Amino acid sequence: MPHHPMMKREREIVDQAAVESIVRGGKFAVLALCRSNEPYVVTLSYGYDDRKKALYFHTAHKGLKLEFLSANPAACATVIEDQGYVLGECAHAYRSVVLYGTVVEVKDLAEKKHGLDVMLRHLEDDPETVKKRSLKDDAAYDRAAILRFDIADMTGKEGR
């Protein structure tokens, strides 16, 4: 998925390990979707699977996200590491990553289990306790839709 080169090249994070560390450390991604020239942006918690280069999200089985994705699976997302506003300098310290790719709904039970496991390990301090409480049997995996954002490219930027 082609994208524009960064205007302020000195702010680009070129080390891919540093870019991935921002994604690994984040908890929320702002996901941008489009259908028929109509934009839609939604913020979602996620889990990052570095082996698959994918983010996993969970959502309701019906709703605007799924309507947009059925019309156009291409997506862009941003993860921000907020380092705070710098008083007296009219500046904000941050590192961010823009991700480009496609989003698919996961239907396979084994991958749904994997996706939720990735999310819980990414977001929770004690993922096993949450799994025991909320995912007692296979039917529990049908309560939510699981989305996988396959990352084609990601770029990092830092500023102050």
Image: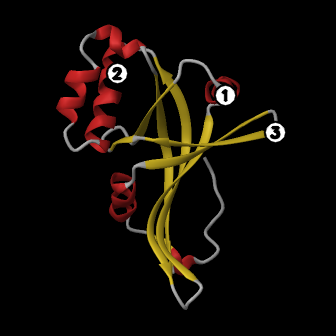
- Name the residue beneath numbered marker 3: 37
The quarter of the displayed image where residue 7 is located = bottom right
Image spot of residue 128 (x, y percent): 18, 31
- Name the residue beneath numbered marker 1: 64
The quarter of the displayed image where residue 20 is located = bottom left
Image vertical order of residue 16 relative to residue 2, above or below: below
| Nearer the observer, 26 or 54 | 26
Residue that protrudes farthest toward the right in the picture: 37
Q: Neighbour class for label 2 at 10 Å: few (<14), some, many (≥20)?
A: few
Q: CA distance from mark 3 to mark 1?
A: 15 Å
For discs 3 and 1, the disc positioned in front in the rendered view? 1
Residue at the spot 50% in from the left edge and 44% down from the top edge: 152
Q: CA distance from mark 2 to mark 1?
A: 23 Å
Image spot of residue 120 (x, y percent): 29, 36
- Looking at the image, is mark 2 or mark 1 earlier in the sequence? 1
Query: Residue flagged by tag 2: what amino acid is it?
Result: Glu
- Name the residue beneath numbered marker 2: 111
For discs 2 and 1, the disc positioned in front in the rendered view? 1
Q: Secondary structure at mark 2?
A: helix
How many numbered marks have been drawn onto this rendered protein structure? 3
- Looking at the image, is mark 3 or mark 2 earlier in the sequence? 3
Q: Secondary structure at mark 3?
A: loop
Residue at the spot 52% in from the left edge and 81% down from the top edge: 10
Query: Residue flagged by tag 3: what amino acid is it?
Result: Asn
